Amino acid sequence: MAENSTLRLAWRGLGRNRKRSVLAIAAIGLGQFAFLATAGIMRGYADHYFDSVTGPLVGHVQIVAPGWREERAVDQTLDNVEAMLAAIRGQAQVARAVPRIYAPVLAALEEEGFVGMVVGADPALEGVANGLLGSEQLAGLLGDGRVLVGKGLARQHGIEAGAELAVVGQDIDGSIASALYEVAAVVESPVELVNSTGIVAGLQDAQALLRMDDEAHEITVRLHEAEQINQAADSLGAQSALQGVEIKRWHEVIPQLAGIIKMMDMYSLVVLGIVCLASIAGIANTMMMSTFERRRELGMLLALGANPGRLFRMVATEAVLLGALGVLLGTVLGACFAALTAGSGFDLAELGGEESFEMGFQGVQIASRVYPEVRASDVLAGVSAVLVTALSACVWPLLHVARLEPVEAMRT
Amino acid sequence: MKIGRIGLLLVPMLCAAPSESQDAVPEAQALLEQFDEMYRSTGTAARIEIKVERPKKVRTMQMRSWSQGEDKALVVIDAPARDAGTATLRVGSNLWNYLPKISRTIRVPPALMMGAWMGSDLTNDDLVRESSYAHDYEIAGIGPSEEPPGWQVDLAAKPEVPGLWERVEVVFKRTERLPVLARYYDRKGRLSRTMQLEEIKEMGDRRIPTRIVIVPEREEGRRTVLTYLHVEFDVELDESLFSLAQLERRR
């Protein structure tokens, strides 16, 4: 009963100066909305970066010959690749394991040479959603001297489907490697490296060009769950077929992108901090004004024998109510934002009046369109932060109440 | 001289016997001009062996080369059999590779000029560059060298000449005034490559270093050894030898 009346009194307290309360609620609401939107956008970007990076190009775990990552010399190959693949695929955490070959070449349609990169890929493994080609139809065109050429390279040098492309490089013995390929199609890959310089050949064609046996430069491993990365890397390292090779987790392969993803999480926390500050200012100001205005009334209640603890609860409830209403408003706005952008995404470039774009970063294609992902945990984080702030913000008003001398207060 | 001329085996040397005493400081400009002229000739034909040493393997190639004046050269690989017939033609600053296996001639683009030539420690650029020590560098000083013993000429790149090297040190033998060592420093002032000129022999009526060892710095276990097996200077060569048509006909 007493709690009910405290709530009622608190509610009435907020209604004393509606404009002030509405302004405070709006400020807190806006803060919560800003936090939810930022967290959603940042998570959307982080997830997009993570998928772009670990998806087609890097994978969750990479297996390469020692030193290959630094030097990328064509003869730094993994041997007995078939046995390695069998051992890797035997691990429960592993979803896919894909061998690849990379060889810089001089390519030419006619006489003029240009720089390219022969990427040896297994057609049976690269046509799936997270593969280098992402299309079974395209992957099916590979092999028997047929190659796919990245759209950037094709545009730059006028390469079209059906053209005959000569490539010259060095094989793993250091001798001259040369081949004539037929361009089966020009492709747009999720991997920037393929788009800008890639001449994607069947794994066997690439092995033949470079005089490799059962060899490849890299095995890219994708796991069922990204969270199992450490466990998976450790158990792969224990396999006898994988001794003497380098096993790298994705964030060791591209630490810069891992750093960016980490920074995005931090950015959301910074916004949460700003929300807390805004709430503190809004709630503290409102509650201070409200308690000062009610000095006389509070003094009278104390003189009539009201328990100071009840007055404390009343002020605290009022603060929490103010925060809760604000956070509710912000959450509703945040939910609307999430619902509106869930399917279509949200293009930051268009928002700034520019055309949407895709950029290549570290061989990965990254788009300006983002699909925000607001989670219940974000709402909870916002709610908890605002409520904790609300309680902290009413410490000063409470101290004021505690110091009230009933007679003194009634005189003012 | 320049690596390009060594690589393609270019021109005649005027190996004048020194007339002054061994202790008198020679004129640096004269030494450099002698270096430039060492392999230069109106027409040169040679057989060369290039051994490319890498940490895990050694690859040996044998080739024939012809050159005319300063800007025309043709190199055809004879061995190993796998690479036989592969040829490089240089005319001016253009470089073409002929690949017999696919019967194609491809011009090397500017972007690949710094790439390795046939997998060696020579770059494509080494083969085409017109650089001349006497013209492209300013003499920064000359003095005695302890190791190897001789006269060391310090060269600084002229600001208007584009090139890889900021500074070059060339050491000449005291007795014959022939170069024995060159150290190349990059734009950051780091020693980047060392070239040793060894086994001075009479060949093609000239005394020339017949073994050139190129050692890239900071790359353990790598070097390229170029050995002249046979050289003829001032021979008459047909102009048409240095044409794309001829390049493709050679197969």
Image: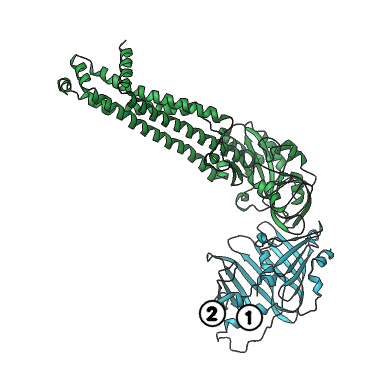
Chain colours: A green, B cyan
Q: Name the residue under label 2.
A: B144
> Label 1: chain?
B
Q: Which of A10 and A247 is in front in this view?
A: A10
A341 above or below A6? below
Judge from the rendering whether residue A195 lies leftward or rightward of residue A371; answer left or right: right
Residue at 71% over, 77% down = B11
Of labels 1 and 2, earlier in sequence is 1
> Label 2: chain?
B
Q: Nearer the viewer, residue A124 or A312?
A: A312
Q: Which of B250 and B62 is in front in this view?
A: B250
Give residue A381's quadrant in the image: top left
Q: In which quarter of the image is the N terminus of chain A?
A: top left
Q: Which residue lies furthest to the top in this view?
A: A1
**Image depth: mark 1 or mark 2 in front:** 1
Residue B37 x, y percent position in the rendering: 67, 79
Q: Are marks 1 and 2 in contact (CB under 8 Å)?
A: no
B96 above or below A317? below
Q: From where the camera sits, is residue A106 visible?
A: yes
Residue A374 x, y percent position in the rendering: 51, 29
Q: Quadrant of the C terminus of chain A?
A: top left
Q: Is mark 2 on a helix, strand or loop?
A: strand
Residue A331 x, y percent position in the rendering: 45, 26
Judge from the rendering whether residue A393 lies leftward or rightward of residue A366; answer left or right: left
Q: Name the residue under label 1.
A: B33
* Crowd rating for badge 1 (residues with CA inside 10 Å; few <14, some 14–19, many 20+): some
Q: What is the distance, in whole Å, between disc 1 and disc 2 at their CAs?
A: 19 Å
- What amino acid does circle 1 point to? Glu
Q: What element carries label 1?
A: helix
